């Protein structure tokens, strides 16, 4: 068991690291990189100390998985994602090797390489999961996502006012 000051130091370190990773993930939503994966990692780190972060981690993890599964469901999207990941790695190598590039440094190049590797790893796992599901005769993760979305839309449609017992307002029946 950690003593009281050890637990406090652990909590502070995990909070600072978790918030830093979370901030990086938020930045990666606009910058090149796997934003939702990094956000999920930040919430995971915070969830080691905070209950509220556990729920947020699950939401972020699900969103990252959903995006990866949707990318794996389409061959063109999969190819683009793989090329994008490889391009990030190549750009990272260039940012390390070419001193005249803006913000050229091992740190910026390394972060691009890391992001490219995360993109590729996520895509490979998503493609592997889809293949395993098809071979087992089960719906792929993307098909399950589509099914969940249709069920959610149907439930929302059924709970709207005026849609009880199959009755729609006249304007909706007429296409207005």
Image (cartoon, rainbow, N blue to C red):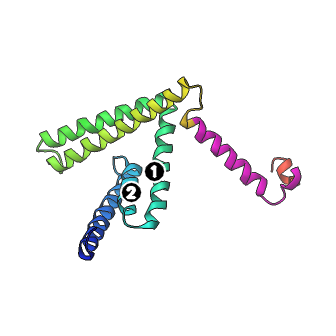
* Circles 2 and 1: CB atoms closer than 8 Å: yes
User: On residue 61, which mark appears?
Assistant: 1
Pick whichever, 31 or 107, lies toward us.
Answer: 107
Query: Residue drawn 43% across and 63% down?
Result: 53
Place of residue 30 in the rendered image (x, y in percent of width and height, measured from the top left) = 38, 53
Query: Residue drawn 46% across and 40% down?
Result: 68
Q: Magenta stretch containing residue 156, yes or no?
A: yes
Pick whichever, 164 or 90, lies toward us.
Answer: 164
Pick whichever, 49 or 19, lies toward us.
Answer: 49
Of helix, strand and loop, which mostly describes the magenta segment?
helix
Extent of the magenta region: 143-167
Q: Residue furthest bottom?
A: 4
In this view of the protein, can residue 167 be seen by the observer?
no
Query: Quarter holding the N terminus?
Result: bottom left
Place of residue 131 in the rendered image (x, y in percent of width and height, measured from the top left) = 49, 27
Q: Magenta stretch containing residue 32, yes or no?
A: no
* Drawn side of residue 37 relative to residue 74, left or right: left
- SS category of the residue bearing label 2: helix
Place of residue 23 in the rendered image (x, y in percent of width and height, measured from the top left) = 34, 61
Pick whichever, 98 or 16, lies toward us.
Answer: 16
User: On residue 44, which mark appears?
Assistant: 2
Query: Residue drawn 47% across and 29% down?
Result: 76
In this view of the protein, can residue 8 be seen by the observer?
yes
Residue 6 in which image quadrant? bottom left
* Drawn side of residue 16 relative to residue 153, left or right: left
Query: Residue drawn 40% across and 62% down?
Result: 47
Mark 2 and mark 1 lie on one chain; the one further toward the N terminus is 2
For the residues labelled 2 and 1, the Cα–Cα distance comes to 9 Å
The crowding category of the residue bearing disc 2, from other C-alpha atoms within 10 Å (few below 14, some 14 to 19, many at least 20), is many
């Amino acid at each position: 068991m950690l003593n009281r000051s050890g637990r406090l130091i652990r909590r502070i370190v995990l909070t600072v690291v978790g918030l830093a990773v979370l901030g990086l993930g938020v930045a990666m939503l606009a910058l090149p990189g796997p934003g939702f994966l990094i956000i999920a990692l930040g919430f995971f780190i915070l969830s080691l100390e905070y209950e509220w972060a556990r729920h947020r981690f699950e939401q972020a993890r699900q969103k990252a998985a959903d995006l990866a599964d949707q990318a794996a469901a389409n061959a063109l999207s999969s190819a683009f994602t793989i090329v994008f990941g490889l391009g990030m790695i190549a750009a990272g190598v260039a940012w390390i090797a070419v001193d005249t590039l803006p913000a050229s440094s091992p740190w910026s190049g390394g972060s691009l390489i890391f992001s490219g590797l995360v993109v590729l790893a996520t895509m490979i796992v998503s493609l592997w999961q889809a293949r395993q599901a098809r071979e087992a005769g089960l719906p792929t993760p993307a098909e399950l996502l589509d099914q969940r979305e249709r069920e959610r839309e149907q439930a929302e449609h059924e709970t709207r006012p005026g849609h009880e017992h199959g009755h729609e307002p006249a304007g909706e029946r007429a296409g207005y």
